[in-house]
C-alpha cells in the first residue's frame, strides 16, 4: 500500500476522532469548543520517518508532533470489529497527544474509556438536553420534598420509605435523581446520599434544593450503565426512580450490582407496559417524554430475578387511573404542557376523596386477582441478596 494511501486513511480517521472528542468537549466545557474548532481547521499532515505521521497546527501557537502508525490496520483478513476497536484506541490516543502538546484543554470526563463505552452517544446527549431543559423550568425553592414523597397520591414513595425503614447513617445512591426530591428527602431522613444524573443542570438544582433544606447531597454526573465510581465503593441502599425504562436493564444491573454488598438493597419503581389507557397517554404526551422509553414488561422484571435471590414486586395505580382520565377530559389539561405524574402528586389533597377509595379497591383486586397487577401503571421492585456476577444468566 502506498504511503499516500496510508496517509489519506490516517488523516480521515484522525479528523473523525477530532470531531468526536471536540463534540464531547463542547458538552462538558463549552467555552473551549471554539479553540478546538480552530485547532482542527489549522491541522496539516505529512508522512514522517519510520512509519510515522507528522501533525502540524497553527492554533493556539504553531507546533507539530510525530505520531507512529505501528499497530494501525487499515485492511486485513481479521474481523472488522477487532480492527476498528484497535484503530479507535490508537487514534483516540494520537488526537489527545497532539491536542495536549498544542495546549488545548481536555475535560477530565472526556476520556477514551467514556467515549468507547458510548457515554456521550447521541442517546445520552438527547437525555441530557431533555433534563437540562426541564431543570431550567423549575425553581428549587418551590419544591416541597415532603409533599412529593408523602402525598396520598405518591403511593410508590410511601411504600418505598416504609420498606427502607430507618436510613440514619446509611449510604444511599440515587440514580437518575432528577431535581432531587427523593435525594434530599432521604438526606433529611438521615441517609448519606449520593445523587447521580446525566444532566449537569439537574445536579445543580439538587445542590440548591439540598441547601434550602439545610442538608447536603453529594452529586456525581454519570449514566446508570456507566457509573464510574472508584473501585470498591459500595452503598447500603441503591434507589432508582423511573430510570430502568430508559436503559438496557442487564447492562444497568451489571453496574449496580458491582456497587452492592451482600446486605445492600436495590429499590426502584418503573412504568409498566400493558395498560391501554396509559399507552394512549404515552402516545399523546410526546413533548414531556424521551423517545427511548420502554415501559417494563414481565420479562424485564424477570431480569431482576437473575441478579437477586430475593425480589419483591408491588403494583400501583389500576382503577385509580380514573384520575388521569378526569384530568384530561373533565379538566381539559394538556399532557404536553405539564407532567401529569408530577401534577397528581402535587395535587394529592385535591384528589384524596377519589384516590383513597379507589386505592382500596386496587389493593383488593390485586390481592384476589394477582394477574391484574401488570395492568397497573407502575411497579415497585425491591431486590435483595445480590447474586455473584459471574453466575448471572445472560
Image: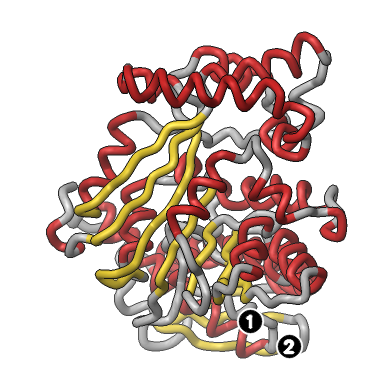
Pointer 2 or 1: first along the chain: 1
Q: Quadrant of the N terminus?
A: bottom left
Residue under the image location 58 percent in, 48 percent down? 122
Residue 265 coordinates in the image, percent (x, y):
36, 61
Kindly indicate the quadrant of the structure image that contains residue 279: top right
Q: Is residue 77 visible?
A: no
Q: Give the structural element (helix, strand or loop) at label 1.
A: strand
Q: Which mark is residue 56?
A: 1
Image marks 2 and 1: residues in contact by CB distance under 8 Å: yes
Q: Is residue 317 above or below residue 57?
A: above
Is residue 132 in sight in this rendering? yes
**Distance from the alpha carbon under mark 2 to that under mark 1:** 7 Å
Report the residue that reaches farthest toward the top: 329
State the residue at coordinates (47%, 75%). 170
From the viewer's perspective, is 179 left or right of 384? right
Q: Quadrant of residue 190?
A: bottom right
**Could you tell me which secondary element the residue under label 2 belongs to?**
loop
Which percent across, then down, holds residue 21? 59, 67
Above or below: residue 189 compared with residue 327: below
Tally of numbered tags: 2
Q: Nearer the viewer, residue 247 or 344?
A: 344
Residue appearing at x 24%, y 54% in the figure: 308
| Pointer 2 residue | 62
Q: Which mark is residue 233?
A: none
Name the residue: 73% across, 26% down.
Answer: 351
Amino acid at each position: 500500500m502506498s504511503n499516500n494511501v496510508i496517509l489519506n486513511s490516517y488523516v480521515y480517521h484522525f479528523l473523525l476522532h477530532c470531531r468526536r472528542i471536540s463534540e464531547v468537549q463542547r458538552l462538558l466545557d463549552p467555552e473551549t469548543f471554539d479553540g478546538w474548532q480552530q485547532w482542527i481547521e489549522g491541522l496539516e499532515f505529512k508522512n514522517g520517518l519510520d512509519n510515522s505521521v507528522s501533525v502540524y497546527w497553527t492554533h493556539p501557537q504553531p507546533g507539530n508532533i510525530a505520531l507512529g502508525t505501528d499497530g494501525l490496520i487499515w485492511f486485513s483478513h481479521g474481523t472488522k470489529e477487532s480492527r476498528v476497536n484497535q484503530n479507535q484506541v490508537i487514534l483516540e490516543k494520537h488526537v489527545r497527544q497532539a491536542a495536549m502538546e498544542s495546549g488545548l484543554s481536555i475535560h477530565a470526563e472526556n476520556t477514551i474509556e467514556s467515549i468507547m463505552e458510548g457515554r456521550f452517544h447521541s442517546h445520552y446527549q438527547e437525555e441530557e438536553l431533555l433534563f437540562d431543559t426541564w431543570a431550567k423550568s423549575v425553581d428549587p425553592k418551590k419544591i416541597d420534598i415532603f409533599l412529593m414523597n408523602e402525598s396520598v397520591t405518591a403511593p410508590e414513595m410511601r411504600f418505598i420509605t416504609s420498606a427502607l425503614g430507618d436510613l440514619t447513617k446509611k449510604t444511599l445512591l440515587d440514580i437518575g435523581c432528577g431535581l432531587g426530591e427523593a435525594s434530599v428527602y432521604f438526606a433529611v431522613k438521615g441517609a448519606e446520599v449520593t445523587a447521580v444524573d446525566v444532566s449537569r443542570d439537574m445536579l445543580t438544582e439538587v445542590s440548591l434544593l439540598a441547601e434550602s433544606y439545610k442538608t447536603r447531597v453529594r452529586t456525581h454526573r454519570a449514566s446508570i450503565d456507566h457509573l464510574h465510581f472508584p473501585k470498591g465503593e459500595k452503598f447500603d441502599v441503591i434507589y432508582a426512580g423511573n430510570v430502568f425504562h430508559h436503559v438496557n436493564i442487564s447492562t444497568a444491573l451489571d453496574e449496580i450490582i458491582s456497587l452492592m454488598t451482600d446486605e445492600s438493597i436495590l429499590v426502584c419503581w418503573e412504568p409498566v407496559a400493558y395498560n391501554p389507557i396509559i399507552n394512549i397517554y404515552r402516545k399523546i404526551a410526546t413533548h414531556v417524554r424521551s423517545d427511548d422509553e420502554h415501559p417494563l414488561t414481565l420479562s424485564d422484571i424477570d431480569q431482576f430475578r437473575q441478579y437477586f435471590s430475593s425480589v419483591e414486586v408491588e403494583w400501583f395505580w389500576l382503577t385509580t387511573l380514573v384520575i388521569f382520565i378526569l384530568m384530561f377530559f373533565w379538566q381539559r389539561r394538556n399532557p404536553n404542557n405539564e407532567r401529569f405524574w408530577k401534577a397528581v402528586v402535587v395535587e394529592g389533597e385535591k384528589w384524596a376523596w377519589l384516590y383513597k377509595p379507589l386505592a382500596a379497591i386496587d389493593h383488593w383486586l390485586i390481592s384476589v386477582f394477582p394477574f391484574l397487577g401488570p395492568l397497573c401503571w407502575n411497579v415497585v421492585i425491591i431486590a435483595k441478596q445480590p447474586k455473584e456476577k459471574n453466575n448471572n444468566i445472560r
